Image (cartoon, rainbow, N blue to C red):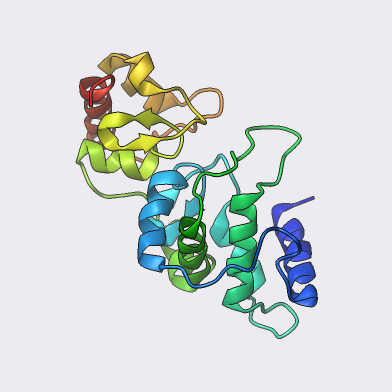
Amino acid sequence: MPVRLALAALLASIALGGTACGTGGVAKGGSAQSGKALFTAKCASCHTLGAAGASGKVGPNLDEAFAAMRGSGRSTHFEESTIKQVVADQVKYPAQRDEGVNMPANLVKGSEVDDVAAYVASVAGTQSSLAAAASGGTTQSTNGKTIFTSSCASCHTLAAAGTHGTVGPNLDQLKPAFARVKRQVINGGAIMPAFKGKLTGAQITAVAKYVAAHAGKK
């Protein structure tokens, strides 16, 4: 089932039921500001969300998915609180796909779930986020750590950057050389997307140098 249709069905069931559908409670409160930082660290390299400067291709494009939910007509419009509930439920109980990499459960826990849900619900699918995604959605920084945090953090563990991703290799254990990191960033591999054309040459060099210099160090 396409992402938009699957989300639409889930949204409809939540809206009609008026509950959290047995998933462990209704999402309440949450700090969008804290949620943005958590999203950048945990989710950005797998999902596209223009407002966060994220252009990940591993998981669903959140702008496209939730733009369909926001809609302009009464028949397609859902309240932000409903979108927030969907995000919270997906974080707690990720949908399992037949092919590809499944999103791990418990990327964030407790009140952090509400924070991430509040942030994503506030921006995903909005005109400004869609516009940012269309323009590339990636960071303009040439700082290696900043690039790593925005584009790689949710998939890789690197203690120096404070990241604990488990989708891709643990870089502290791998300790890759500069040339290997640069080649992988340019070309991608397995589930990792290629960043050639998404990051500039200077950015690719900067993030490769950062990883090579800090992998295995705290």
- The outermost residue toward the bottom is 74
Can residue 22 be seen at all in this image of the molecule? yes
Residue 163 locus on image (x, y percent): 36, 37
Residue at 51% x, 44% y: name it. 107
Observer-nearest of 24 and 176: 24
Above or below 170: residue 141: below
The image quarter in which residue 58 lies: top right
Residue 149 locus on image (x, y percent): 32, 42
Residue at 63% x, 68% y: name it. 26
Side (left or right) of 211 relative to 31:
left
Observer-nearest of 106 and 197: 106
Total numbered labels placed on residues in the image: 0
Can residue 197 be seen at all in this image of the molecule? no
Side (left or right) of 114 relative to 206:
right
Residue 154 locus on image (x, y percent): 44, 39
The image quarter in which residue 177 lies: top left
Side (left or right) of 30 relative to 204:
right
Residue at 80% x, 76% y: name it. 16
Above or below 55: residue 157: above
Assign the C terminus to one quadrant of the image.
top left
Residue 73 locus on image (x, y percent): 69, 84
The image quarter in which residue 148 lies: top left
Residue at 58% x, 67% y: name it. 27
